[in-house]
């Protein structure tokens, strides 16, 4: 009789306090991806990749995160989703203001970050404008364009909550609870990841790294030293609509674990879409270099020593025209030699397979 009563009590306790295994909060449900800065273009990227099978064969759910004070009008994104009946896309608007000195500690965003983390299976931090240098303790260069302060603050704080950083080593990062949770930082997302961990940035690659002082000097360099199409567009502002983005090769370092698995036994140097004038300089806590430009001067990917599914890439693997669509671009301002970006990757092996492998890694971890 006593054993029966004890068994009933144990069952009641388990019913009142469900037990979750590490990394299985959404087990058995549709995989949930979080994406920060959900502009219409970024949502389109996800839609195209989903349609092309890069995000798995099954259903996914996308939570689009932004801050209430951002200058971007996300009402347009909400309308885009509603008009196209994308029922698998939802939005989460972060509330409140956090001072610069409180970004890298528990703050009023902590519980909001926690809730998003607990209902999701992975997160993507996308590209965008420059980070205000005061966040990493430097003065503002004349060439820095920091025009999205609220976005920078919440994303740097969110990434700190996920992976921790040198600014506050006593803080327990969320990923300690879910080691398989994938975090992908793309371009600005990789830079923000580094800042969140306590690192710093090169504020302008042409001037600081290559000692160049003009657009004309940049365009005289080899493809491997040009990291953005902004320079050619600056010289041909009225004819730049179809100018192709900049591409260059990367080389994976011997220290890489995750990116080396993604590359696998592929031969050659993958070509990547490059659209940045800033880059990682001093590495944040527990981050290491996973890939560089072919000349070794620009950090192109970073990984985390403790959290093996944290990856920051300085390039853009998400751009929809890399994966589908017949929009034609040219490298010639006079409008000659048009080509699609997907065909460009295909004709520069192992670039196309590399991009597919990268998204295969991410979605595999999402689905676990």
Image (cartoon, helix red, strand yellow):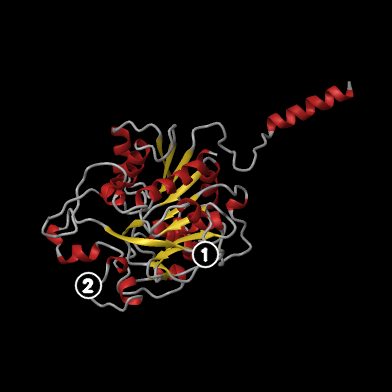
Q: Which residue is mark 2?
A: 220
Dot placed on the residue nearer the N-terminal end, 1 or 2: 2
- Closest to the observer: 196 or 184? 184
User: Is residue 17 shown above or below 176?
Assistant: above
Residue 158 seen by the camera? no
Mark 2, other Cα within 10 Å: few <14 / some 14–19 / many ≥20: few
Q: Are marks 1 and 2 in contact (CB under 8 Å)?
A: no
Quadrant assignment for the C terminus: top right
Quadrant assignment for the N terminus: top right
Q: Position of residue 107 (x, y in %)?
A: 54, 56
Mark 1, other Cα within 10 Å: few <14 / some 14–19 / many ≥20: some
Q: Which residue is mark 1?
A: 288
- Closest to the observer: 324 or 208? 324
Residue found at the far right of this picture: 2
Q: CA distance from mark 1 to mark 2?
A: 31 Å
Secondary element at image label 2: loop
User: Is residue 152 shown above or below 281?
Assistant: above
Q: Quadrant of residue 21?
A: top right
Residue 220 seen by the camera? yes
Secondary element at image label 1: strand
User: Is residue 211 shown above or below 269?
Assistant: below
Q: Position of residue 170 (x, y in %)?
A: 64, 62
Q: Position of residue 309 (x, y in %)?
A: 53, 51
Q: Position of residue 180 (x, y in %)?
A: 57, 47
Residue found at the far top of this picture: 1
- Closest to the observer: 269 or 31? 269
Residue occupying image coordinates x 15% and y 54%: 337
Residue occupying image coordinates x 59% and y 55%: 173
| Pair 1/2: label in front | 2
């Amino acid at each position: 009789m006593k054993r029966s009563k004890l068994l009933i009590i144990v069952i009641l306790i388990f019913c009142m306090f469900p037990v979750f295994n590490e990394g299985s909060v959404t087990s058995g449900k549709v995989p949930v991806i979080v994406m920060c800065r959900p502009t219409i273009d970024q949502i389109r990227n996800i839609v195209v990749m989903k349609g092309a099978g890069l995000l798995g064969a099954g259903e996914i759910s996308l939570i689009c995160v932004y801050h209430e004070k951002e200058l971007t009008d996300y009402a347009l994104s909400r309308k885009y989703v509603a008009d196209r009946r994308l029922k698998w896309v939802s939005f989460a608007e972060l509330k409140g203001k956090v001072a610069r000195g409180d970004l890298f500690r528990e703050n009023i965003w902590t519980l909001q970050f926690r809730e998003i983390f607990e209902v999701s299976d992975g997160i993507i931090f996308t590209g965008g404008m420059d980070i205000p240098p005061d966040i990493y303790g430097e003065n503002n260069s004349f060439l820095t364009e920091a025009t999205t302060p609220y976005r920078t603050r919440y994303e740097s704080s969110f990434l700190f909550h996920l992976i921790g950083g040198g600014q506050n080593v006593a803080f327990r990062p969320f990923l300690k609870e879910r080691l398989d949770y994938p975090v992908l930082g793309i371009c600005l997302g990789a830079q923000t990841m580094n800042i969140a961990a306590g690192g710093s940035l090169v504020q302008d690659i042409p001037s600081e790294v290559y000692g160049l002082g003009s657009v004309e000097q940049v365009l005289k360099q080899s493809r491997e030293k040009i990291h953005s199409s902004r320079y050619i567009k600056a010289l041909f502002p009225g004819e730049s609509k179809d100018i192709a983005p900049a591409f260059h090769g990367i080389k994976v370092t011997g220290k890489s674990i995750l990116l080396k698995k993604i590359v696998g036994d592929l031969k050659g140097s993958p070509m990547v879409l490059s659209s940045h004038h800033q880059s990682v300089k001093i590495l944040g806590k527990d981050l290491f270099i996973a890939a560089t430009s072919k000349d070794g001067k620009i950090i192109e990917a970073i990984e985390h020593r403790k959290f093996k599914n944290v990856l920051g890439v300085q390039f853009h693997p998400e751009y929809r025209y890399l994966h589908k669509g017949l929009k034609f671009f040219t490298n010639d301002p006079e409008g000659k030699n048009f080509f699609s970006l997907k065909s460009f990757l295909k004709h520069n092996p192992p670039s196309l397979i590399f991009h597919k492998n990268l998204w295969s890694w991410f979605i595999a971890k999402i689905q676990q």
